[in-house]
Amino acid sequence: EHRAVMEAAFVYGTIHQFVLTTEAALLKATGSDDPDVSSAWLLFCHCQRATDPAQPCRRTALAQPLTLLNIHRHLKLMGAPLVTEVAEDPEKVSTVHLQLGLPLVFILSQRETYEADRRTAEFVAWQLLGKAGVALLSRDLVDLNVLHRSNVALKTPDEGMPIQYLVLEDTDEVITLVEDKNKVKQIQEDEEKEEEEEEEDEDEKESNNQDIQDDQVVEAVSRDKKRELPLEQVLVLTEENFHSSLSEAAQTVVLFYASWEAVSLAVLRSYSEVADHLKGTPGVLLSRVNCWDWPGICTQENVTQFPTIKIYGKGEKSVTYDGMWGTEELTSFIILSRVSCPLKLATMDEAEGYLRGEFPPELSSHHHTSLLGVFSTATSEAREAFEEAGNILSGHVMMGTYFEDDGLALSRKYSVSPPALLLARSGGRSVEGISLSKQSVQDMVQMIRYELLDIFPEITVQNLPQYLQLTKPFLILFSDGDISQMESKEMLKLAKGRPQQAFVACWLNLKKTPVGYGILRTYFAAVPSLPVLVWVNLHAGGQVFQFPPEQSITEVNILSWLEKLQAGLETPSCTLSEEDWKPPLPAYDFLQMMEAAVPELPLHTSHHPGDMPAQHPPESPGGDTATREEPSQESMAGKAGSPGRDLRGTAPRLAAREKQGRRHSEL
Amino acid sequence: AAYFLQQAGRDYVVFERSHAPGSFFALYPRHRKLISINKQYTGKSNSEFNLRHDWNSLLSHDRRLLFRHYSRDFFPHADTMVRYLEDFASLLELRVQYNTAIIHVTLERNEQAWNGHYFLLTDQDRKNYKCSSLLVATGTWVPNVVNFPGSEYVEGYETVSINPEDFAGQTVLILGRGNSAFETAENILGVTNFIHMVSRSRVRLSWATHYVGDLRAINNGLLDTYQLKSLDGLLEGDLEDLAIVKDKKGKLHITLRFYLENGNISAGIDSITLPQDELDNFATRAPYDRVIRCLGWKFDFSIYNRSLRMMPGKGNIKKYPQIKPSYESRGTRGLFVLGTASHSVDFRKSAGGFIHGFRYTTRAVHRLLENRHHGVPWPSTVYPITQLTNSIIKRVNEASGLYQMFSVLADIILLRELLPKSAFEYLEEYPTGVLAELEMQTGRKAPNGLFVIIMEYGRNFSGADKDVFYYNRAVGEAQHAWQSNFLHPVIYYYKRLPTEREMKLRPPEWPLPRPDAIHHIVEDFLTDWTAPNAHILPLRRFLENCLSTDLRSFFAESCFLFAFTHQKLPPFCQQGYVRMQGLVGSEGLRRHAVQAGLLQDYTLTDFSGDRPPDSHDRSRDQLLRDQVIPVRPLQHLVKAKDE
């Protein structure tokens, strides 16, 4: 240490004055709390900058071990200007600090606050002296594309790391930021080494995991394969009985599946439950075709993927099921498919009854929203479109049609003019009228689907896709159990507030949809106190914002929070990963194995003749080994033939006989 | 071919020399036992699969026309085949003009014609016919003969007596070592003194070579009697070196052309040197009563005008006309060779020379022609990418064309759009030899790469001199699948269609050029490749890594979680759940998935932190976390592929 200081003094003696001391009193006076007497330390006294000679000079201790290099570095840092003023893009700024591997802190300044910012910068700079550089960046001179509220930026010496812009409240935060960074870096470096090792381990582990099933459906099905399914209610169809069976019941449901395919086997399990639910329902026959046994039927019925469910009416064309592969959904589809869609209602009474929820007996269990199309003579075009839409939505929606000629009584009652749509929600307790302006079938289907969506739904695994299709941000209230009436009221107000909602307001019952905990954990690392209101930009950017938990959930509070969100004044809690779904694990690289095992395999040459330096084994310089091997094989085969039986070459052998004979005589 | 043309509504006519179809089978095989198997039972009802073990039926939609309805014999009688072919032609109302022997074929140049010329055919009555496209399915019916001194004493297989009593107490020499030779020997084995068999090459056993044209076990009784020293025997020798002389008693002696050239033939038998005169233990020194020639057949080249340039192949395929891998003649555009005569494409490799093989190649030619002349693209089905693994598994388990015509016909998967909206197009049984011309030949496009699915035997497993029964001949583990010996599916992945040049420069014994990645599905004792872990899982990983995506299936609950925690969804969720077709799954299945550690049960966990460390299997836990946390890209994998 002494030598390092002496050498430094030799170099820097003309610039700085070097003092050596072993005086204990002086050591105490330097203010070290816990002077480690056994080792030396170096202090830089900023006496040159001192304005008041009565005050002691500021001092900066060298934090690193006393080596020539560290002393040199320290002197350099001490010699650098305390605060650098910057008027260019911070990305391009480079100072002594960055060159020496230290971070650079920018204090973002404006003309109005320049003096104060300058003082702050200097204060921070003194604190960070030797640990980081401080620069004062004037926002008026540089066009920064960052949040207006940001006041500090941090540039790290690592190449390619973006500058972080931060909103900090006091100077301590700046200091801890830098000091922690350094600490974190230290730890990271250590960890990286470990991680590298770990990663290697993981690599190994991963390649060993290749043969472990990571498909949840396949694994679940194969774990369940020994259980015999209760399929007594489900008729097995074959090539022989397929067509005859279709004419037996009014409605034949056919599940086309492959007995080796996991997804169809998973559906088969739900299907057996459906069969159980529908046991004894007249006119409905549940059946199945195993396409692995009867590929002919499946091709003929145009089944190209597994599973497929088709419902065959007597003599009618079939309907392909396109809903969720769940017991409830499928059961309800089959039940709804039993009545024609739309249902023709002849009289005013029938129509009124329908709106009250008096359905044909087959549908006694139906409690969802139902639709009634009301038409007059002049609107047959709309009625045809509505009927076509009914065909498409058959099984999903309860639809009726009423052709009005008795003085427009129904329209008047619900104050709409035909063509119009009446929606009876929650078993007829509320009826809503909508006039039908769009005439195309597709538009009508779209509109009906949209109208059936709830204003403030409880989001579930089953209904999410319907709301996803709106491609809007989600405002979700996560609640442990039912939400309170107050919250429900406020949220409903909010949801109804604007006619053209820019977002989907919904809530999630964690008791009913426990997977919601998984969502919260991804958003906040740990589950926050409930209920929690979250804004998720699912389709644009993926930012997740948490409604301040200290505020109460009221329409006003939420609206003002949303405004702040829109203005970019809030920082997201997290951003959803936008990564692609890559293969979970590598495949066996058979190509490489084949090349390794058969190095002379001229696999390379076919594609890239230039790509393979020195891949050929040296013993085959001229050409491929395969051609060289062939003749040798042939000669082997020649040798293998037993002498005496071989006619080939008999003549030469006979010619050589004389010689042999002579040898015999010699013997 | 007639059936396919009929189905497509094309204008065609079939000329048949005889008065009935299948006249070859009216005479051959001489001993009337077909060696093509007619399996009644396979334990499966899958009609496509069952064709793998039905070597006699032709392809048609009519289920009555399955050979098992005609015969219950495992090796049926040849008359049954004649009857079957008659029914096939009449039930399907094929346009066949019988008793018409085409004796001359020539070309007539015409700019308007499909191929720049018409084919002019002349029959035995000098009647002329003109057509745009000529399909030649005349088989190989001209018996091969050899000429050597004394070959006039040789009887031919086509005329030799089939009554064993005619051979009682006789000594017989048979020339040739194919199935017809052994069939002839088998017939008379019990009544002769002994039988010797001579041919140039050593015996090739079909169970060792996996080629059905080699000696079948049903005919190989003589191998037994030879190896058990029961007087019969096999010898190798070039028939061209041979000479036969008849002595005064009518016995036939084997000698060598070498001696006849030196000696004086006119002087009679006594002056001719016999080998045993010099080498007194000469193998075939015993005289024979009869010599029978069973040397197979060749294509009839005689009826074609020189302008058609119908040339014999070179080397061991000289009995067949030269054709391209598309079955089109090398000499004449628009002339296609079908059936047995087209076997040069896969001679001694696959089954193209036999009914159970050429029924598929004929269909392939029909599809090529439909595209070329009528603009009907090769039939294909479009599937979403989530069905990729399934579509392959389905085909490799049931497809009969891939199985019979292994390494010759391939299923092709054309990747249509790039991820994530990916879909693919599936083409069945396309000839691998013309892979480079795929876009032109099928009318389908391959802009984003393709998979080629074929069946292969292990490269060094079969052969005439190989021991195919050695211990550990079968591979059981998926990770060693590339070493599989028995017929197993192999999938080649190309980022782009191989070029003509790459096809030419492909490694010897490889059906296809070097792919960008390859996958072998491990051979299976039951040829049932539906095991979730040994067959489907490695295949999925291969496909995933080729496409750089995640092809796992997920329950709706997982998709729900991903929808809220990822900006992008795996294809299964994207194409199922998001379109309201999520897999809800029964409660029991969910429990199994949770137990497997592949689905997290959030009702049970404590919500403060991570899962309690009581999980049994750390690696499973890792997999689980991979789903909940954004999946890390596997850098090393990408690197490995780049390299």
Image: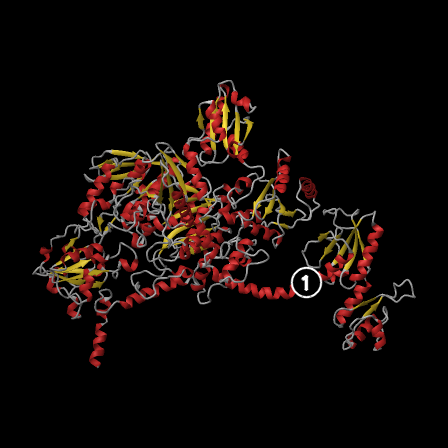
Q: Is residue B106 left or right of residue A405?
A: left
* Placement of A384 over or under B229, stated as above or below: above
The residue to which callout 1 is attached is: A185
Q: Position of residue A161 (x, y in %)?
A: 68, 56
For the N terminus of chain B, give its image quadrant. top left
* Placement of A570 over or under A48, stated as above or below: above
Q: Chain of mark 1?
A: A
Instruction: Classify residue A135 by image quadrant.
Output: bottom right
Identify the residue at the far left of this view. Answer: B249
Towards the viewer: A510 or B287: A510
Q: Position of residue A78 (x, y in %)?
A: 81, 64
Q: How many marks?
A: 1
The answer to whether residue B342 of the structure is visible from this angle is no
| Colour scheme | secondary structure
Instruction: Classify residue B3 by image quadrant.
Output: top left
User: For the residue labelled by badge 1, is the local secondary structure a helix, a strand or a loop?
Assistant: helix
Q: Is residue A174 left or right of residue B304?
A: right
Query: Which residue sits at x=71%, y=45%?
Result: A569
Towards the viewer: B457 or A364: A364
Towards the viewer: A487 or B170: A487
Instruction: Classify residue A494 by image quadrant.
Output: top right
Q: Position of residue B633 (x, y in %)?
A: 55, 55
Towards the viewer: B201 or A3: A3
Q: Position of residue A258 (x, y in %)?
A: 38, 47
Near mark 1 (Cα within 10 A), the count class, few <14, some 14-19 or many ≥20, is: few
Under mark 1, the amino acid is: Lys
Q: Is residue A69 left or right of residue A210?
A: right
Identify the residue at the far top of this view. Answer: A407
The answer to whether residue A129 of the structure is visible from this angle is yes
